[in-house]
Image: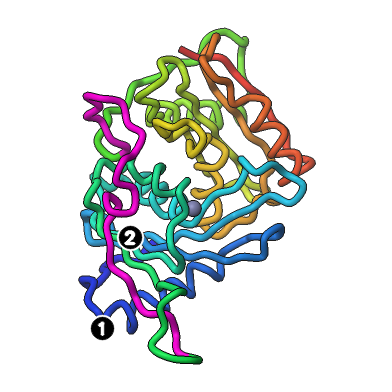
């Protein structure tokens, strides 16, 4: 969900505006394994606020999980933000998210969360804590000389290769997947771009591409990014009718098998195909 005009963060707005917004974000959480709901709000340079919630896949893998901070940071990217100004979270960000948020390029990103260890008194809500990404992760894993970040890197046009003629329905998905692939963010690896297009049972679309973390594991694969797009548009993963993934002929790391495996858990009857591109 996107809020058009988010107020500046002050002690008053944290309680009156952002706390209810976090509750709203948490309502979209889907944690069937941990039952632990997290909400996050990212404020973009445009002044818009992006709500994020955590998502887990029942009988899936640890790596299928989307953290609330990853969700909100990704939603801001999908909306075309040029950068982000702050993040508010319902709980202290985990180490995985601290490393992932380094891809925003803002070491001093202000972070606000309710500190469960610090209450004004018994029965009182936790007090707010203000910190920064740099203070939460003073020695991040980065590559020396890296200047690009998730919000400012330039798209690279991708094309389908081979595979013969396509039906009209499939061509629509392939075109969207190629458009998504152009947005791939993979500053460390060379051939790890990809684009995923999803069609829902009622003919709506969602798309995704990889958002690579310098430390690899916090990377958001194309399916997870497409799920952020899908869920934020109000759809459920079991409403996926078909999906098309485009990736290089010889990728450094492939998303094909992991996308298919996770898709089988989320939407067992969905059709899936992988097409090569360059
Ligand atoms: Zn996390």
Q: Quadrant of residue 85?
A: bottom left
Q: Which residue is mark 1?
A: 12
Residue drawn at (51%, 49%) of the image: 228
Query: Does the magenta segment cover residue 137?
Result: yes
Q: Work out whether 24 lies above or below 274.
A: below
| Span shown in magenta | 124-150
Left or right of residue 32, residue 29 in this image? left
Q: Is residue 1 visible?
A: no
Task: Indicate the secondary structure of the residue bearing disc 2.
Answer: strand
Does residue 154 show up? yes
What number is the disc on residue 26? none
Left or right side of 87 for 245: right
The secondary element bearing badge 1 is classed as helix
Quarter that holds the C terminus: top left
Residue under the point 25% across and 30% down: 148
Q: Is residue 54 left or right of residue 9?
A: right
Along the viewing direction, whichever of 139 and 114 lies nearer the viewer: 139
* Rendered location of residue 141, percent (x, y): 36, 34
Badge 1 residue CB within 8 Å of ligand 1? no
Is the residue 38 above or below the residue 233 in the image? below
* Residue 155: image location, x then y, percent: 31, 27
Q: Residue at x 45, y 15 (%)?
A: 191
Q: Is residue 187 left or right of residue 95?
A: left
Alpha-carbon neighbours of circle 2 within 10 Å: few (<14), some, or many (≥20)? many
10 Å crowding of disc 1: few (<14), some (14-19), many (20+): few
> Quarter-wise, where is residue 93 in the image?
bottom left
- Residue 142 is situated, as x and y percent measured from the top left of the image, at 32, 31
> Label for residue 87?
2
């Amino acid at each position: 969900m996107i809020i058009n005009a988010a107020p500046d963060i002050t002690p008053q707005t944290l309680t009156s505006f952002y706390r209810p917004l976090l509750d709203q974000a948490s309502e979209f959480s889907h944690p069937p394994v941990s039952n632990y709901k997290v909400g996050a709000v990212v404020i973009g340079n445009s002044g818009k606020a992006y709500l994020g919630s955590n998502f887990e896949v029942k009988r899936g893998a640890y790596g299928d999980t989307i953290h609330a901070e990853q969700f909100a940071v990704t939603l801001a990217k999908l909306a075309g933000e040029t950068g982000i100004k702050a993040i508010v979270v319902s709980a202290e960000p985990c180490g995985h998210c601290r490393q992932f948020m380094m891809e925003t390029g803002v070491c001093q990103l202000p972070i606000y969360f309710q500190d469960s260890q610090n209450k004004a008194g018994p029965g009182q809500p936790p007090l707010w804590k203000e910190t920064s990404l740099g203070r939460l992760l003073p020695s991040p894993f980065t590559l020396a000389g890296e200047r690009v970040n998730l919000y400012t890197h330039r798209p690279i046009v991708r094309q389908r290769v081979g595979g013969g003629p396509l039906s009209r329905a499939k061509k629509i998905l392939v075109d969207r997947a190629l458009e998504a692939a152009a947005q791939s963010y993979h500053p460390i690896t060379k051939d790890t771009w990809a684009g995923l297009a999803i069609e829902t049972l009622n003919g709506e679309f969602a798309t995704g591409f990889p958002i690579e973390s310098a430390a690899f594991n916090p990377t958001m694969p194309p399916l997870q990014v497409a799920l952020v797009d899908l869920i934020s548009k109000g759809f459920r993963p079991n409403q996926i009718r078909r999906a098309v993934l485009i990736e290089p002929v010889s990728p450094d790391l492939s998303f094909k098998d992991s996308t298919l495996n996770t898709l089988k858990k989320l939407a067992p009857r969905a059709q899936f195909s992988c097409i090569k591109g360059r």
